[in-house]
Image: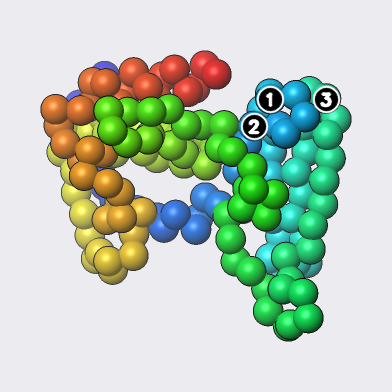
């Protein structure tokens, strides 16, 4: 690990920045599938490259003019692919970009925050993500999830 990787500058990412493509457990074959949502077209899709399982849903509320702005997997009630128990909690990520963002934060010994809004992803994380004593164990979990 280089000196530059010991520093993390918060980009003020929000959880919603990662929710349009979510890696999930395929309901047919239990391999990795991808759930995606397009809020403009008001459609959500789930596709498994392994077995070909394919599902599409409209994100509007039946009988109303509303559009649900949810993470992609919620439209299908699908289980997250990137999820592992940690102590009395669960470590999870929506997709590779989310996992890498968390990895950079957790690995950093110096964490710089700027212009926080109380809505950023890092501000909403459970305490165990922030604690230095969990750094090594969480990085092992991240490595395991990357290989999954």
Cα separation between marks 2 and 1:
5 Å
The alpha-carbon separation of the residues under discs 3 and 2 comes to: 12 Å
User: How far across and down, in percent of the image, does residue 17 sit?
Assistant: 50, 55
Q: Is residue 87 above or below residue 45?
A: above
Residue 29 x %, y %: 75, 24
Up-down relation of residue 101 to residue 71 (above or below): above
As drawn, the label of residue 51 is: 3
Q: Which residue is mark 1?
A: 30
Q: Which residue is mark 2?
A: 25
Instruction: Determine whether, in the image, residue 30 is placed left or right of residue 103.
Output: right
Residue furthest toward the front?
88
Mark 2 residue element: strand
Measured in 3D between alpha carbons, the distance from the residue under mark 1 to the one under mark 3, in whole angstroms, is 10 Å
User: At 82% from the left edge and 52% from the top edge, which residue is drawn?
Assistant: 56
Please, what secondary structure does the residue beneath circle 1 have?
loop
| Circles 2, 1 touching at the beta carbon (< 8 Å) | yes
Few, some or many C-alpha atoms within 10 Å of disc 1 (few <14, some 14-19, many ≥20)? some
Residue sitting at 41 percent across and 19 percent down? 143
Q: Earlier in the sequence, mark 2 or mark 1?
A: 2
**Residue 118 rendering spot, x and y as whole percentages:** 27, 66
Q: Please tell me which residue lies in front, 137 or 63.
A: 63
């Amino acid at each position: 690990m280089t000196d530059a990787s010991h520093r993390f500058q918060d980009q003020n990412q929000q959880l919603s920045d990662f929710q349009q493509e979510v890696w999930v457990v395929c309901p047919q074959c239990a391999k990795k599938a991808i759930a995606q949502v397009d809020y403009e077209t008001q459609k959500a899709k789930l596709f498994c490259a392994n077995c070909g399982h394919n599902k599409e849903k409209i994100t509007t509320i039946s009988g109303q003019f509303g559009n649900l702005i949810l993470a992609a997997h919620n439209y299908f009630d699908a289980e997250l692919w990137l999820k592992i128990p940690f102590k009395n909690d669960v470590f999870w990520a929506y997709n590779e970009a989310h996992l890498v963002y968390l990895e950079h934060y957790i690995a950093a010994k110096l964490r710089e925050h700027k212009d926080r809004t109380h809505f950023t992803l890092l501000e909403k994380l459970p305490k165990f993500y922030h604690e230095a004593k969990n750094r090594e164990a969480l990085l092992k979990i991240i490595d395991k999830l990357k290989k999954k």
